[in-house]
Amino acid sequence: MTDQSYTAALPDPARRPDFYAGVNGRRLLAWIGDGIATLLLSCLALPFTAFVGIFFFGALWMGVSFFYRWLTIAAFSATPGMAFWGIQLREADGGRMSTGTAAVHTLGYLVSVAAAPLQLISVVLMIATDRKQGLTDHLIGTAAINRPA
């Protein structure tokens, strides 16, 4: 009998706590790094808006952030910050994120960031739950795990 925890579902935190150990701290560091990267990319995009983007910089940054996160999660199941810190997002079946799930996850993340109470709920859930899942993770069945070797 083979261990199905790698392919049939998200790893069971009781049987495989190594997949979730330290994820919250590294997820925070990845979030900071990705935030800096999207801020810099947004600044680089300003000349292409004839600098009018200065007046709606928050919306520009959210747009850049959406595409940065969606495209990298769809391609690698992680943002560059997550990849650097050794974590990946996985779907409920344990597989890598699909393009559609990556888009939904990214949209849920951006809604949470835009509404502070939702972000607070997300942080509490990450701290309090066995799989360290944020609000969007809970809603769509995904989780951040340590990158399998």
Image (cartoon, rainbow, N blue to C red):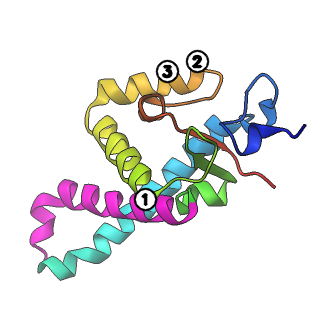
- Dominant SS of magenta comes to helix
Q: Spatial distance from mark 3 to mark 1, Cα to Cα?
A: 27 Å
Q: Is residue 59 magenta?
A: yes
Q: In the drawing, does residue 88 fall left or right of residue 135?
A: right
Residue 35 drawn at (x, y percent)? 43, 55
User: How many C-alpha atoms fall within 10 Å of the one at disc 1: few (<14), some, or many (≥20)?
Assistant: some
Position of 2 relative to 127 (above/below): below
Disc nearest the viewer among 1 and 2: 1
Q: Which mark is residue 124?
A: 3
Q: Secondary structure at mark 1?
A: helix
Amino acid on which disc 3 is placed: Val
Q: Earlier in the sequence, mark 1 or mark 2?
A: 1
Pick the quarter of the image with the C terminus.
bottom right
Q: Which residues are magenta?
A: 51-76
Residue in front for this viewpoint, 10 or 146: 10
Please state which amino acid type lies under the numbered disc 2.
Ala
Q: In terms of secondary structure, where does tag 3 sit?
A: helix
| x and y, in percent, of residue 116 in the image | 30, 29
- Crowding at label 3, few (<14), some or many (≥20) Cα neighbours within 10 Å? some
Give the residue displayed 90% in from the left and 37% down from the top: 1
Mark 2 lies on residue? 128
| Numbered circle sitting on residue 99 | 1
